[in-house]
Amino acid sequence: MKREQAAHIDELVRAASGQGSRRDAIIEASWRRCVTEHNLDPVVLRDPCIVTNARLREHQEAMDEFLHTARFGVETLYREVAGLGYVLLLTDAKGITVDFIGDPTFDSNLMRAGLYLGADWNEPNAGTCAVGTCIATGEALVVHQSDHFDATHIPLTCTAAPVFDPSGALAAVLDISALHSPQPKESQYLALQFVKSVAHKIETAHLLNRFRREWIVKLAPSPEFADVDPAYVLAVDGSGRILGFNNRTRQLMLRELECRPALADGRPLAGRPLSEFFDLQVDDLPRLMPSRPASQRMVRLALSGTPLFAQAQQPPARIASPSPLAPAPALPKPLEALTCGDGAMLEVAARAAKLVNTQMSLLICGETGTGKEHLAKAIHAASGRAGKPFVPVNCAALPETLIEGELFGYEPGAFTGAAAKGKRGLVMEADGGTLFLDEIGDMPLTLQTRLLRVLAEREVTPIGRTRPVPVNIRVIAATHRDLIAEVKAGRFREDLYFRLSGGVLTLPALRQRADLDWLVARFLAERGGVLRAPFELSGEARAALAAYAWPGNIRELANALDYACAVAGDAVIAWDDLPDRIRHAAPAPAGGAPVAALSGPTARGGMGSGGTGADERSALLALLTAHHWNVSAVARALAVDRTTIHRRMRRLGITSPRHGGEGLN
């Protein structure tokens, strides 16, 4: 690998000096920009830049409406390539990854490569790469292996397409990348077509959502596709003024302006009359409604005369005196209790509320620890089955040799070792209520067939019995796996997947949620009630929790707070009460060397991060003496809570002279 990196750096240096290379013109131009404009050194190997959670949330909130629209497109593309080793990134116009889908099995490898949520792929920072170079050029492209400027990215193949907003400005970049791929660059050209197609669909969906109360005009080169897959879409107001368009329409209008340079006067395309580009007035739009045959809905471009076939979508009728908007229906209390203000979780809860009393099976997806069982219990508690059993089954925990008997039950003497009275089985235990199948992706294929029959027939046949027993159950399954990829790999039955996924609810990861403070307060209140002691967080502890990525999600948060409550010396949880992995992932409180000496494990009796226990005691004594034993002043100097200083004094055996001590017990 080092030899390959050295050869790559040599080629970069030659290309930057004008000696040329065998690369595409767009790659060569990017290499030159990296050296001459971005001042990047080809010899320097850079670690990926991943922004803090706080900055990531700022970037996500700035494009919240767009992200809701784009998420379906990202998921659609991922389903097309699931199991092929790709990861999907959606970045904003600055190159910050605001959405991400990848196989969680490879999270650590993806993070090291920068293929992760919050990664900064802008060209001035990362060099030649699909996202950054797409932002710089506005073009879809493949940056394959050694096309990358930074030699650390040589193993990667990245394909990106721009996504424009309705005014023609860059809104986002959709990227599909893989850690490993075949050597030929041509192997990624199909991926390029996929990404361009989905980027086009996201643009169009965002346009339709933004201007859903205006005239929408869709155009296609042939009548056969005018109503099916129109390439060009634009929004028009009641006076015939163009309000917005997708990128293909923008390119079409720019080509029209080339036919008459006098009209290319620098004015924005949005705001111009429809008739400037099309042989069409706003009064003509009603005759382009889908009720007429597409062949009779031909229009021409005003300047070139090119024929197109149109479909017009009329805006909804406007009410002269609108009545006050009805309030959104209240969520059932069990679902309402899942969040406090996070948009993604509220959307999941609202969708679940519509499904609580249906008979369809539900599939809950999400990373490990996101609270899939909590959501299933809330759905059960909000439904008409609330008074009946909720029976959870961890499909990954049951031994394969026992799972059939555990699920479906057995008759007395059905097999060697069977209980004398037989066993009802978990499916029958859930009769009238809800059967929750956790980690359904880990169920053996042989048992998937039997489960499919239970779902289809709503009856179960215990082992050793010839006649089935009817059951009335609601099935909710959960998984952290991509079941579509599992189906393609032959590890999960396709018919079972479609039977389980009558409704799919996807839980956001904790790092994507905006209600972390509420979750923390809720957990602390629960633990305080159990321990009969109220707990609260210090400022630096709260900052450390906010900065942490939470790969274990809500389960990891609960464990971390359990630990902090157990080790805290008083009711205030300080930075050094948090688990090591959280403290090491966030900067220590500011204050220089004394902070390092005072914030490490020495406070528990071990070695400190800045020296020995004696060093820590000496450092704290020096600070206390310098501030005339004013604990508040020392706390301000170290940017910590005064309770933290009192706790450290107790642990180190330091007593204030004001309380009869001489500095040391």
Image: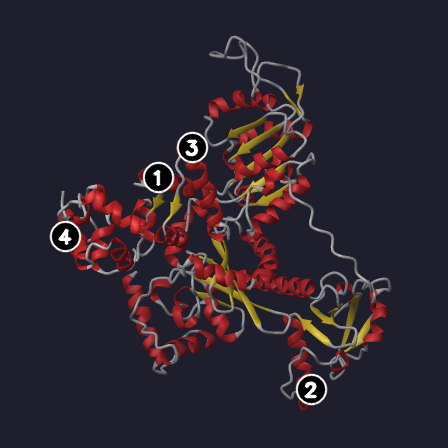
How busy is the neighbourhood of tag 4: few (under 14 within 10 Å), some, or many (20 plus)? Answer: some
Tag in front: 2 or 3: 3
Please report the residue visible at 44 percent of the width from the left and 78 percent of the height from the top.
Answer: 29
Q: Which circle marks residue 563 in the picture? A: 1
Q: CA distance from mark 1 to mark 2?
A: 71 Å
Give left or right: position of 351 versus 399: right
Q: CA distance from mark 4 to mark 2?
A: 81 Å
How busy is the neighbourhood of tag 3: few (under 14 within 10 Å), some, or many (20 plus)? Answer: few
Give left or right: position of 389 versus 665: right
The vertical placement of 144 against 434, above or below, is below
Give left or right: position of 167 versus 534: right
Q: CA distance from mark 2 to mark 3?
A: 77 Å
* Residue tagged 2: 259
* Residue tagged 4: 618
The one nearer the camera, 415 or 412, is 412
* Residue tagged 3: 530
Q: Quadrant of the N terminus?
A: bottom left
